[in-house]
Image (cartoon, grey):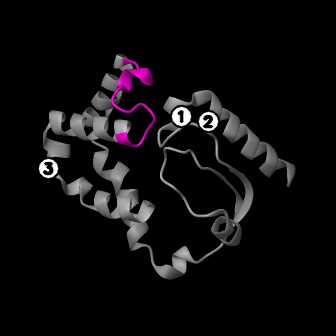
């Protein structure tokens, strides 16, 4: 799933409507908030109007849309030898149900020093906004486990 989204987003940073039209950028961001999150068509069930406008203004004024998308394209371009290296630092993953589906647990165990894995019943790609208490709980759980193993 990440791979297909990476390919789709690869063309994103060069898309003129994201950098030369505030309406185009706003439409793109709102669509991502709706399709990658838990709010569906009701943005204001998760975000206040001020939060939405702040986010859109921040992206328009500072212009980071290209760099924020670039990492998705980079996932596709990573050399195989880089992707096959095991990550030895303690690693934790929270698989929110409305987020991209990450690698299976067996892969994570083989490729990382997996110390925490959870699959909560709610949350999406924008979990810090959608489920802030759950997100903080996940961070605390991971760091508690990781630090106890040192």
The CA span between labels 2 and 1 is 6 Å
Q: Residues within 10 Å of mark 2 (few under 14, many from 20)?
A: some
Query: Residue 16, labelled with which disc?
Result: 3
Query: Residue 128, labelled with which disc?
Result: 1
Q: Residue at x 68, y 40 (%)?
A: 138
Position in image of residue 12 (x %, y %)? 25, 54
Name the residue tied to disc 2. 135
**Left or right: 130 as drawn, with respect to 133:** left
Q: Is residue 83 magenta?
A: no
Q: Residues in magenta?
A: 35-48
Query: Is the C-beta separation of discs 3 and 2 under 8 Å?
Result: no
First of labels 1, 3 by sequence position: 3
At mark 1, the secondary structure is helix
Q: Residue at x 44, y 60 (%)?
A: 2
In the displayed structure, 116 sits above or below 134; it is below
Q: Nearer the viewer, residue 32 or 73?
A: 32
The mark closer to the camera, 1 or 3, is 1
Position in image of residue 34 (x %, y %)? 36, 36
The mark closer to the camera, 3 or 2, is 2
Q: Is residue 40 magenta?
A: yes
Quadrant where the image shows the C terminus: bottom right
Q: Residue furthest bottom?
A: 81
In the displayed structure, 117 sits above or below 126; it is below
First of labels 3, 2 by sequence position: 3
Query: Is the C-beta separation of discs 2 and 1 under 8 Å?
Result: yes
At mark 2, the secondary structure is helix
Position in image of residue 70 (x %, y %)? 35, 57
Q: Main secondary structure of the magenta part?
A: loop
Q: Nearer the viewer, residue 89 or 3?
A: 3
Position in image of residue 126 (x %, y %)? 47, 38
Query: Residue 49, labelled with which disc?
Result: none
């Amino acid at each position: 799933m990440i791979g297909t989204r990476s390919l789709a987003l690869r063309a994103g940073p060069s898309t003129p409507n994201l950098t030369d039209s505030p309406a185009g950028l706003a439409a793109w961001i709102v669509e991502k908030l709706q399709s990658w999150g838990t709010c569906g068509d009701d943005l204001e069930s998760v975000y206040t109007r001020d939060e939405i406008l702040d986010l859109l203004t921040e992206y328009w004024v500072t212009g980071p849309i290209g760099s924020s998308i670039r990492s998705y394209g980079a996932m596709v371009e990573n050399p195989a030898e880089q992707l096959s290296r095991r990550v030895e630092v303690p690693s934790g993953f929270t698989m929110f149900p409305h987020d991209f589906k990450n690698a299976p647990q067996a892969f994570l165990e083989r490729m990382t020093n997996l110390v925490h894995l959870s699959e909560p019943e709610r949350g999406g790609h924008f979990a810090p906004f959608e489920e802030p208490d759950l997100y903080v709980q996940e961070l605390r759980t991971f760091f508690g486990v990781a630090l106890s193993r040192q």
